[in-house]
Amino acid sequence: MHLKTGWIVSLAALVVLMGGGLAAVPAQIPPGKRAPSFALKSVEGTSHALDAVKDHPMVILYFFDVESRPSQEGLLTLDRLARQHREARLTVWGITLSPAQKVAEFAAGRGLGFPLLPDTSGVSDLYHARVVLPTVYILGPQLKVLDYFQGGGRTTEVMLTRLAERTLQARQPALARALGGEAGAKDPGNTEARAVQGYAALKEGKLEEAAKTFDGLAQKTGRAEAVGKEGLAAVYARQGQAEKALQLADEVSRKAPERAYPHVIKGDVLYSQGRHAEAEKEYQEATRKEEAPPFQRAVAHNRLGRLNAAQARYPEARELYDQAVELDPYYVEATANKGVTYERQGQWGEALAAYKGALALDQNDVFTAVLARKAQERLDLERDAARSRRVDALVKELAERYRQQKAAPVEEVDAWTSRPMVLSFVDMQERGGLADRDGFPIVLAEGLTEQLNRSGRVRVIERVLIERVLEELNLGSSELADPETASRLGRIMAVKLIGTGTLNHLPGASLLNLRLIDTETTAIPRILTAEVQPGPAFQKTFFQLSRQILETVMEKYPLRGYVVEAAGDEVMINLGAQQGVVLGTRFAAVEEQPPVEYKGRLLQRAQRTIGELEVTRIEPDLAYARVLEQDRPLKTDDKVQETGGPARETR
């Protein structure tokens, strides 16, 4: 998923007489603590306050000496990469104690992409960065210290490598690859830098590039070999080559037993094979081992949290999600997963707080945004006592109807006129691997409900009502996979179509198989398939699926009605917003043709189109349409049938 809140890399630069080698300094701001606030003005006089960027996902404080080349090295590297990867919105601040003339000389001709901020208020002392330079702090969300480095040379290389890992966590794989490349160029033997490049390529779906990078490491000996083969195992797993992935991960575990990630890879493969108990043991083993970068250790905790949540061990799951976020503060998925555990326990306030925390990391995360809207709606329902009582009573009534197999009472209408098209979605079954995110079926159903209701052509039953009825009847997704059970449920709520199906989680993507079931006939008018991936394309998936559903509705269940009045080039028909008519909907006026007698049989002929109409005004139960074409003047009781309209678009 793509972070668009904006990156601020505050490079707080201080001029001192030293700059170069690594030295031990006892004082520092420890990881996990909030960075002290400060405000300074740039050489142009613009004010820059650290608190003003507390909502940015990453801040780097880089203390350096303007007159020391080793001290400047990392800063200038970051500035160059920021220009090459503007999509990451990498911004740099520079803070220096140098005289104004020295600062001007440093900036002259460089065209720096960051402001230089003279330190006039002791920021260097506040950050214990006066003695050894450069001193670098990497700050995460809410300005918490993630990493701390002092010294140039080899330490700059280590800093760039760790920053590459952090940007990979923050879903900036292109920048992560570039940072890893810079660190690797300084030291071709830097295993961690090469590994970050491989995992960044893997995250971008560039499997050949990832395999080439990891294979290069695997040809070496010692730790590099283990890291390389571990990465190759991850590539094999992503390619669906389960046995090769297991064999290579097992080999790494034997040769480097302290490494954590091979157990995650084995757990993923075993889970996809239905060997859930074995997978859980592998994830547990992964969480106990510390030899892995933070982003890989975080995945192990999230996976184990998912398994605990699936078994309703919610407190244990939340603890594991918290540990995952502590390791990877950019882990939107683990943060949202914690919210899902609260949701399943009916703790909507806590769920909403977790979802808001995830959205603070990535405000464009469609998956979490859908969950947050649902949680807010449920909170609103709980606070509305009168509405809550009405829902409770309706749930009991519907559950009793289901038990007695009584269909919902339907208003009597003629055989031709359409009733409102009502749909509902029930949770889909999840199969295959263990997705990084919990709540996939919830989000798909909620997202489609929002899109379809927005179209005006159909009405989708509120999810809260469906969920409450299912709870009352103790029905799960496995029972609802049966068309007869789904049809019975739909009939008690006067639902015409029910959407259900399966979500098969594969390496790199999930495949949705969505069946639309006609509750009156149990027929399946359409089966929809789609590749589903949380991220920038997730909203597009909702649009495409909802459009296909609407096309099916209009093709298989076109609106039908009668002309109530006709006057010149305008007619009134007995269908309105309640039945799904929207502005621009087109109708054909039709008339029956007499049957043809052939060899003693009467053969029914197709209806004849005698006019074309387009809706221009809508009332709840009536619509007014402009006559586009007519073979004869239209009159009261002429039949009309939908032929298409703007409802195909749900945006």
Image (cartoon, rainbow, N blue to C red):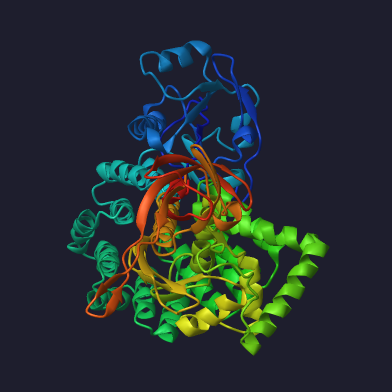
Front residue (pair 153, 527): 527
Front residue (pair 455, 373): 455
Q: Is residue 64 left or right of residue 419?
A: left
Front residue (pair 613, 108): 613
Position above or below: 14 against 162: above
User: In x, y percent, where is residue 336?
Assistant: 56, 60
User: In x, y percent, where is residue 62?
Assistant: 49, 34
Residue 328 visible within the image: no
Q: Quadrant of residue 467?
A: bottom right
Q: Quadrant of residue 277?
A: bottom left
User: In x, y percent, where is residue 81?
Assistant: 35, 34
Residue 359 visible within the image: yes
Farthest residue to the right: give it: 385
At a point 64% along the width and 35% down the height, the residue shown is: 51
Position above or below: 172 against 350: above
Q: Is residue 393 left or right of residue 217?
A: right
Front residue (pair 476, 187): 476
- Numbered label tally: 0
Farthest residue to the bottom: give it: 404
User: In x, y percent, where is residue 218?
Assistant: 21, 63
Position above or below: 284 against 221: below
Position above or below: 468 against 228: below
At a point 45% along the width and 40% down the height, the residue shown is: 627
